[in-house]
Image: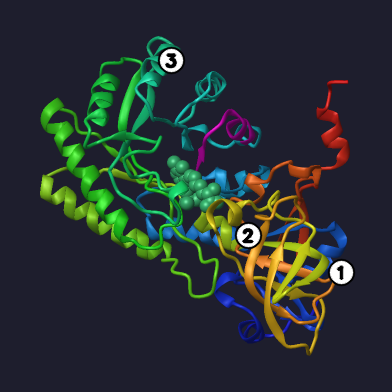
């Protein structure tokens, strides 16, 4: 398909929130990795999520380049399927999983188990059984009561590597619901309150557990590098305290994820290089201050790898003018993207596949679900003549949308199509009524 120069997209839409390969194409279309979005909407139906494989891989690589001595562990919760597991394996990343399901998926592709980190504030018996059977590299301890439970399941003579998740007492992240570094929420063991130290002592007393280090995850969509600097200082101070009081020098620090993605043009989203530089500089400085040997670093980016690579496509079902407001309702909504309703997340929207000379006007794009809060994007600029049948594209849709999609109103979860080098392939098919009916076994 013929594509036009990049500069055109830059004029018409918001370059910073589109994958690098996005270019304007004739007829008001946008092509991604050389594949027409309008054609994909036609072929797969809508809503459909399109994932630019090259964008995912190059972002994964950017993290590895930014922290060449660190282990970069992709947070599968952002979005995972078998192809993504393969991409991460090929790019040399590890995998952060938080359920037996994610673990089993990784195992079906032969993902190296030693590169898997298991998380969870409440790991189920099945999670732990699966992790120990598969032989994950690390289990992150998030509560006192799982210490003995994990230890008791480790075969005699063996030792499972674990990290203790500490709470540094830092407030960071885009929304209260995704801030996990501050006191007073369910994750981690408080450094200030002494719980982290108690847990470290208990883990050290378990022969079935090998304490490799500390973990800390501050929150998500953190748009500044500063909180990471502060976290590093607090974690290293705590490592030094453990060494001084308990005589052990722990060799690993996992700083979690939380690195921001741009959803709106101009959104702050520091590069992996910027986060990486800040983290390594602070780590060196803090270790020098405490005469602590430089620990091996781990990071767990999810959103910053996946969000910018995804574009959601919807078809307009209705246009309604209510007073001064224009509601454009599409064939998806909070069942495939609960983020606006949950966190007040904002997106840009662009029409694709039709040209128009109509002026732009402020529009609210809403979903088709039975709630007034089912709003996908408020106050976005769309052509005045937008009408049923038009295709709308929502960039920055690769993370925490399909992975959080629900069965609400039985509309069926959307398919995911990967594009690369001018070709597309279906990764996840649409959930059908047959799928839904098959689970309904009660009559
Ligand atoms: N590591 C741990 C332990 C985590 O809990 C998370 C995300 C990550 C890494 C990856 O964070 P990221 O780099 O993707 O920010 N559903 C919310 C985000 C929840 C994040 C949960 N934990 C949203 O849509 O904004």
Question: In what element is the residue under mark 1?
Answer: loop
Residue at 27% over, 19% down: 202
Give the image location of residue 92, x and y in percent.
Answer: 50, 48
Quarter of the image for residue 346 reads bottom right
Sequence-first tag of 1 and 2? 1
Question: In what element is the residue under mark 2?
Answer: loop
Colouring: rainbow
Whether residue 91 is visible here, answered yes or no, is no
User: What's drawn in magenta, residue-wise?
Assistant: 91-105
Whether residue 288 is visible here, answered yes or no, is yes
Question: In what element is the residue under mark 3?
Answer: loop
* Along the viewing direction, whichever of 302 and 343 lies nearer the viewer: 343
Q: Residues within 10 Å of mark 2 (few under 14, many from 20)?
A: many
Which label was assigned to residue 95? none
Give the image location of residue 25, x and y in percent.
Answer: 76, 80
Q: Tell me if residue 335 is in the magenta stretch.
A: no
Name the residue tied to disc 1.
389
Name the residue tied to disc 2.
397
> Which corner quadrant holds the N terminus?
bottom right
Look at discs 3 and 2 and give the one toward the viewer.
2
Q: Tell me if residue 103 is in the magenta stretch.
A: yes
* Along the viewing direction, whichever of 54 and 430 lies nearer the viewer: 430
Q: CA distance from mark 3 to mark 2?
A: 40 Å
* Along the viewing direction, whichever of 78 and 367 lies nearer the viewer: 367
Sequence-first tag of 1 and 3? 3
Give the image location of residue 192, x and y in percent.
Answer: 21, 37
Name the residue tied to disc 3.
154
Q: Is residue 147 left or right of residue 8?
A: left
Residue at 28% over, 44% down: 169
């Amino acid at each position: 398909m013929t594509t036009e120069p990049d500069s055109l997209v830059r004029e018409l839409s918001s370059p910073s929130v589109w994958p690098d390969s996005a270019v304007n194409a004739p007829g008001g279309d946008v092509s991604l990795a050389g594949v027409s979005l309008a054609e994909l909407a036609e072929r797969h139906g809508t809503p459909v999520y399109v994932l630019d494989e090259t964008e995912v891989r190059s972002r994964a690589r950017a993290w590895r380049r930014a922290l060449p001595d660190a282990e970069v562990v992709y947070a599968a919760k952002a979005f995972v399927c078998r192809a993504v597991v393969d991409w991460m394996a090929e790019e040399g990343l590890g995998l952060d999983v938080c359920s037996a399901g994610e673990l089993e998926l990784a195992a079906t592709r032969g993902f190296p188990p030693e590169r898997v980190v298991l998380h969870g504030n409440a790991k189920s018996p099945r999670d732990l059984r699966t992790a120990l059977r598969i032989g994950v590299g690390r289990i992150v301890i998030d509560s006192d009561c799982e210490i003995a439970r994990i230890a008791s399941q480790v075969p005699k003579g063996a030792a499972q590597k674990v990290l203790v998740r500490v709470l540094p007492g830092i407030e960071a992240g885009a929304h209260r619901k995704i801030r996990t570094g501050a006191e007073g929420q369910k994750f981690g063991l408080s450094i200030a309150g002494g719980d982290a130290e108690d847990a470290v002592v208990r883990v050290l007393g378990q022969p079935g557990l090998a304490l490799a280090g500390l973990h800390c995850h501050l929150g998500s969509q953190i748009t500044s590098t500063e909180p990471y600097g502060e976290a590093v200082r607090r974690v290293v101070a705590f490592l030094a305290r453990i060494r001084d009081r308990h005589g052990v020098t722990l060799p690993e620090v996992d700083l979690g994820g939380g690195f921001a993605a741009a959803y709106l043009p101009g959104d702050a989203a520091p590069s992996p290089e910027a986060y990486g530089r800040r983290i390594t500089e602070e780590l060196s400085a803090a270790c020098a201050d405490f005469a602590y040997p430089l620990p091996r670093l781990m990071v767990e980016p999810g959103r910053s790898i996946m969000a910018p690579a995804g574009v959601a496509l919807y078809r307009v079902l209705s246009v309604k003018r209510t007073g001064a407001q224009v509601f454009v309702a599409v064939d998806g909504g909070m069942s495939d993207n609960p983020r606006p309703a949950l966190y007040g997340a904002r997106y840009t929207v662009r029409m694709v596949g039709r040209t128009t000379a109509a002026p732009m006007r402020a529009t609210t794009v809403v979903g088709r679900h039975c709630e007034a809060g089912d709003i996908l994007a408020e106050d976005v600029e769309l052509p005045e003549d937008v009408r049923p049948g038009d295709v709308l594209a929502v960039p920055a849709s690769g993370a925490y949308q399909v992975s959080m999609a629900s069965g609400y109103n039985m509309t069926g979860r959307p398919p995911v199509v990967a594009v690369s080098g001018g070709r597309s392939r279906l990764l996840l098919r649409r959930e059908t009524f047959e799928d839904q009916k098959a689970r309904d076994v009660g009559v």
